[in-house]
Structure formats: C-alpha cells, structure tokens
Image (cartoon, rainbow, N blue to C red):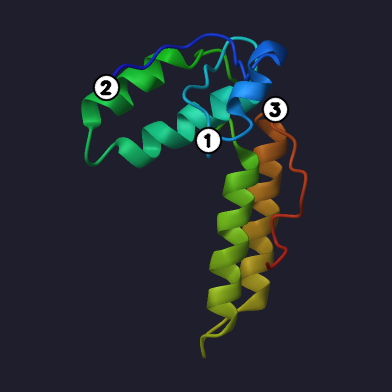
Amino acid sequence: MRFRSGVTRIPPETERATHAGTSGLGRVELDPRQDRHARAALEAYADSAATEMPWLAEWLRTVVPATHPGFTYCAATVERLFGAARAWAAQQPDYAPGAWDEVGGQLAEMLRRSGEPAERSADRTE
C-alpha cells in the first residue's frame, strides 16, 4: 500500500468525461501543508489505523505538519462524538445534565483555545 501526499486532483477537466461513468476516483492526493481538511483527514486516518497498522499510523502522523497549536485538527469530529455521547447518556437513568453542560463548556473552550474554532456548540445533542 503506497501513500503519497501531494495536491488533490479530483479529476481535471480533461478527464471528466472518462470518469463520468465510473463509480469512484482512482486516486486522490492530499496536501496537508496547504489544506486543513487534508490534515484533519490524515489525523483521523491515523487514529483509525493505529490498532491494526501502527506503522501506518506512525507514518501518517509524521506527514501531518506539527505546527498545530492544539490537540486536534478536527474539532468537528470531537464535537460530533461529544454530542453522540451526550445523547446516549441522556437515555440513562443516572444522566446529570449539569455535569454534561460543564464538560461541554470546558471542551468548547479547549477547542477554541487550540486554534480550531468550534463551529457547533459542544453541548448540543445530535
């Protein structure tokens, strides 16, 4: 399995007709130096692959620039997971909304300070 960082090419105009009948792209290249979404995708891929392919996760983490001041490139994923966890907890008999509000507020502040602005409220349930 080869991975190469670079520039995203989602087929150029000259290849659109060729790709029109296919079910997917053959290859997408990401440039984590220039694209924050590429950094978030590589971070998520590294996290996902860590258990089964630790060597790949380690390599992907070296590809992502280490200049990010925060703890994640993808605050949206953190917020989505927090919302899902809160929604699940709300169905439990020992749910404590005040505690979840406090944790949600602290998480939102942590994301705000990390330089990745929270686009959704961290305490919002999905």
x and y, in percent, of residue 56 in the image: 28, 25
Of labels 2 and 3, the one closer to you: 2
Q: Earlier in the sequence, mark 1 or mark 3?
A: 1
Look at label 1 and name its amino acid: Gly
* Disc number for residue 71: none
Residue in front for this viewpoint, 111 or 62: 62
> Is residue 19 at all visible to an observer of this figure?
yes
- For the C terminus, give its image quadrant: bottom right
Q: Residue at x 32, y 28 (%)?
A: 57
* Disc number for residue 24: 1
- Residue 28's place in the image compared with 120, above or below, is above
Of labels 1 and 3, the one closer to you: 1
Q: CA distance from mark 1 to mark 3?
A: 34 Å
> Is residue 70 at all visible to an observer of this figure?
no
* Disc number for residue 115: 3
- For the N terminus, give its image quadrant: top left
Q: Earlier in the sequence, mark 1 or mark 2?
A: 2
Look at label 3 and name its amino acid: Gly
Of labels 1 and 2, the one closer to you: 1
Apparent side of residue 55 relative to residue 103 in the rendered image (left or right): left
* Outermost residue, bottom side: 93
- Quadrant in the picture for residue 68: top right
Look at label 2 and name its amino acid: Met
Q: Which residue is mark 2?
A: 1
Residue in front for this viewpoint, 11 or 112: 11
Residue in front for this viewpoint, 98 or 9: 9
Residue in front for this viewpoint, 124 or 70: 124
**Judging from the image, what secondary structure is the residue with disc 3 in?**
loop
**Judging from the image, what secondary structure is the residue with disc 1 in?**
loop
Q: Residue at x 67, y 73 (%)?
A: 98
